[in-house]
Image: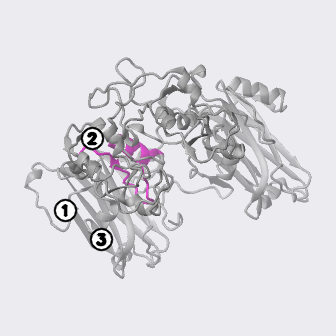
Amino acid sequence: MDLDSIECVSSSDGLDEDEIHLHHTLHPYSLSHHHPELSATKPRNGSNNSGIAVPTATAPATSVHELLECPVCTNSMYPPIHQCHNGHTLCSTCKTRVHNRCPTCRQELGDIRCLALEKVAESLELPCKYYSLGCTEIFPYYSKLKHEALCNYRPYSCPYAGSECSAVGDIPFLVAHLRDDHKVDMHTGCTFNHRYVKSNPREVENATWMLTVFHCFGQYFCLHFEAFQLGMAPVYMAFLRFMGDENDARTYSYSLEVGGYGRKLIWEGTPRSIRDSHRKVRDSHDGLIIQRNMALFFSGGDRKELKLRVTGRIWKEQNPDAGCVSSSDGLDEDEIHLHHTLHPYSQSHHHPELSASKPRYGNNNTAVNGGPTATAPATNVHELLECPVCTNSMYPPIHQCHNGHTLCSTCKTRVHNRCPTCRQELGDIRCLALEKVAESLELPCKYYSLGCTEIFPYYSKLKHEGLCNYRPYSCPYAGSECSAIGDIPLLVAHLRDDHKVDMHTGCTFNHRYVKSNPREVENATWMLTVFHCFGQYFCLHFEAFQLGMAPVYMAFLRFMGDENDARTYSYSLEVGGYGRKLIWEGTPRSIRDSHRKVRDSHDGLIIQRNMALFFSGGDRKELKLRVTGRIWKEQNPEAGVCIPNLCS
């Protein structure tokens, strides 16, 4: 949505005319928020939250590890693994590099897959390659590479931006490297005052940059200053990076100030970790950006020479996790701020416990003895029921090629009627035998690790899993198709940290919604606030959309939990003004029902635009709605009346 289409008015929004405070918090780091206990492609081993104990897997032999090393690039091989007629293997990347000739015996390689070695790799459990640096995790072979790219123990890259420096190491090593090899200025202290001078400010190039390192609070920080083209506009930018991991970086804040001649520009933010490259931080504009004309104004004189004095300060946050805005933060209790940081973390939602031959390990769950956990290996029948294309469990009709390779009916058209394994024409051959084998299977729910202990026939399991009470919840954020899933505490933290949603405590509320141009009603104009009361969380939605041809505003409440629990609460919403008011009372809907489903069922307070403008008063050119509300717990929720067209 257009971020300027709806705004929040606060009594503390008055700025000094000489000061412009920039707050660019719309650039979250690109670290993965993967929660393996919810999105594991294979079920997990060891003890879990429900106390279910699963046997652990065995350790592989060293000689097998050596077989999986490509003889050309010496990297670990991943499917497809190729081989020559004599059985010598190499990775798919190197197959083209050696001009389709085996590097061992010089025989032509052809298109022979070493499926046996690929299946052996599936059963391997390997330590992280950074185990010598402190990582003690064990991973399935095909998961190890992904972990190593994000491992907290992996070495850091040199933060120097002037060249493609390939130096890597720990922080003390990189500090010495910057000082001795790049001759970077080193300073001690948490405040700084620097002057940047450029003789010809009309020449703005990406190469015009500067780096300074500061040592304070026992940590090191990199201050970057550079000139570059932002689209067609020449700009200068200053930003700070923390020499350490992102979690530690979030415990600090910093400010940058530049000005002159009665004007100044101030930036406050959180330093980015050097895990994020210099270019990535710069291109995200997460820092103090100064337009060239403003920079020349600050420089004064004949505007032929740039003279910028940048001052700044670094401080340690007392409570870095308390990032939400509430009425105790100096804001009017009737007004709230909108935060639209639509960057959901990418998260897989695949739980095929049927194909659990690939054990998974993670950082969240451990066995009783404190070591890493593994998953129970599944039987060969379970593996046969996994489609080789989409990796989902197969259901009738199951197809196969003449060589017996199976795949699901959905993928048959996707591969253009060619077997993805042997490339033979598929035809219309049904694998009735496998369908009948599946019919006799009884399998646990894929959410067994989350607490479900039910066992189902293979063909009934899918229907149950679509309604299982233990299935994870989807993110209730309506501004984007966020794919995040998890339990309620995880989603509350996700809404607060990733979507920057306002969090409030209490069962009554009084909010003011302001929109500068109420004639523009779009489906994307919306707002979300989370309330914590009675030990539960509730989502208050407010949005504008077209109801048929009529523009309307709507407010409704959703309960962060299951429908049965939602029915134990009620809420009221009231809007009014100038001797009129409109009141809604109802039961909050569960977030099991999507935001769109609740909105389209009209289960909430609907305000016609003309009435909303009447409530706003004035010249009817600006929407100013004050919505008050209350949440309460029903004494006898079973006596409630169910409205068929509103209740799911």
Can you say which quadrant of the picture contains the C terminus? Answer: bottom left
- Asked if 487 appears above or below 215 in the picture, the reply is below
Give the residue pinned by disc 3.
606
Span shown in magenta: 468-497
Amino acid, disc 2: Gly
- Of the image marks 2 and 3, the number of the one nearer the N terminus: 2
Identify residue for label 2: 535
In the rendered image, residue 523, in percent from the top left (x then y), is placed at 42, 70
Instruction: Give the image location of residue 308, x and y in percent.
Output: 81, 48
Give the mark toward the camera: 1 or 3. Answer: 1
Decide: is 69 above or below 29.
Answer: above
Tell me where residue 158 appears, x and y as whole percent.
73, 34
Mark 1, secondary structure of its residue:
loop
Element type at mark 3: strand
Q: Which quadrant of the figure has residue 302?
A: bottom right
Residue 139 colored in magenta in the image? no
Query: Which numbered marker is on residue 400?
Result: none
Q: Tell me the distance, in whole angstroms, between the alpha carbons under discs 1 and 2.
A: 24 Å
Between 270 and 445, the residue placed more toward the observer is 445
What residue is at 77 percent from the left and 58 percent from the top?
A: 229
Circle 2 SS class: loop
- Residue wearing tag 1: 647
- Residue at 83 percent of width and 43 percent of height: 195
